[in-house]
Amino acid sequence: MRLTAFLLATTLAACSTTLAKANESAYSERNLDACKTLSQTDDDDPSITLQCDGYKDFSVYFKEGDLRQSQAYGPISKEWLDEAFESFGPFNHTNAKIEWRLGTGGKPVATIVRWFVSDPETTSDADARYGQVLVVSTVATSDNPTSCVVGYVDALENKDANTLARKIADEEAHDFACGVSEPQWLGTRGKLAGEPMRYLPEAKE
């Protein structure tokens, strides 16, 4: 009887620890009209960089150039702000809704954002087709002022796409080294998912 009680208590304690470590989600809505313009060009290759409200004091840095978009999160360095750009080869745009995965103490450790990636085989806006990809990114901190893509999930090919994206965020983001580690796809990847592209500052040794 004592052994049974001990095993039950051990099991409950293990479950409590697991629940305590489980990440939660918070959400924000990015409003480009309310963002602060950090830089903008109006030449033959127009581009823009914006700083937007995110989750609490964690900003969202939005970039657009050549009909492609990129986003970074948290207190990134000036070098990262100026040089980093992660997107897809085909023309694309991001959803305004951002899911923040919260770790210890409620601090965000990753974000999940839906990207709409155009099919390069379509010939006009009228018949354009779009893939949908959930992009998981790290959130910068004062100790590590970099934010980059951790992984991808094809949202059209996987019914459990949100669950897969959260799995990447919770298991990979914390130890992911921007500029060193390579982001991976999880689940089935279809032909409309597009090919990622990235330009990142060289990692410092």
Image: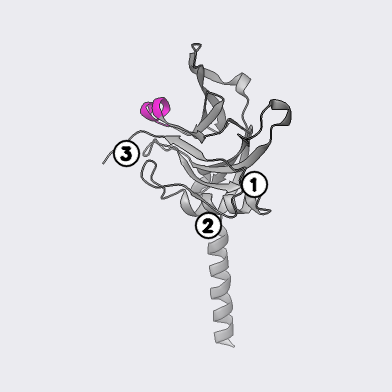
* Residue at 47% from the left image edge and 36% from the top image edge: 197
Above-or-below relation of 48 to 8: above
The span shown in magenta is 76-83
Observer-side mark, 1 or 2, equals: 1
Please name the predominant secondary structure of the magenta segment in the image.
helix
- Percent across and percent down for residue 77 are 38, 30
**Is residue 142 visible to us here?**
yes
Secondary structure under badge 2? helix
* Residue at 28% from the left image edge and 38% from the top image edge: 204
**Is residue 23 visible to us here?**
no
Secondary structure under badge 1? loop
Secondary structure under badge 3? loop
- Percent across and percent down for residue 39 are 47, 16
Q: Going by the picture, which residue comes out furthest to the top?
A: 42
Find out whether residue 80 is within the magenta segment: yes
Q: Going by the picture, which residue comes out furthest to the bottom?
A: 1
Q: Quadrant of the N terminus?
A: bottom right
As measured in the structure, the alpha-carbon distance from the residue carrying label 1 to the one carrying label 2 is: 26 Å
Q: Amino acid at mark 1?
A: Ala
- Percent across and percent down for residue 112 are 57, 42
**Disc assigned to residue 203:** 3
* Residue matched to label 2: 21
- Name the side, left or right, on which 117 lies relative to 109: right
Q: Quadrant of the C terminus?
A: top left
* Residue matched to label 1: 155
**The one of 99 and 86 positioned closer to us in this rendering:** 86
**Disc assigned to residue 140:** none
- Percent across and percent down for residue 61 are 50, 28
Q: Amino acid at mark 2?
A: Lys
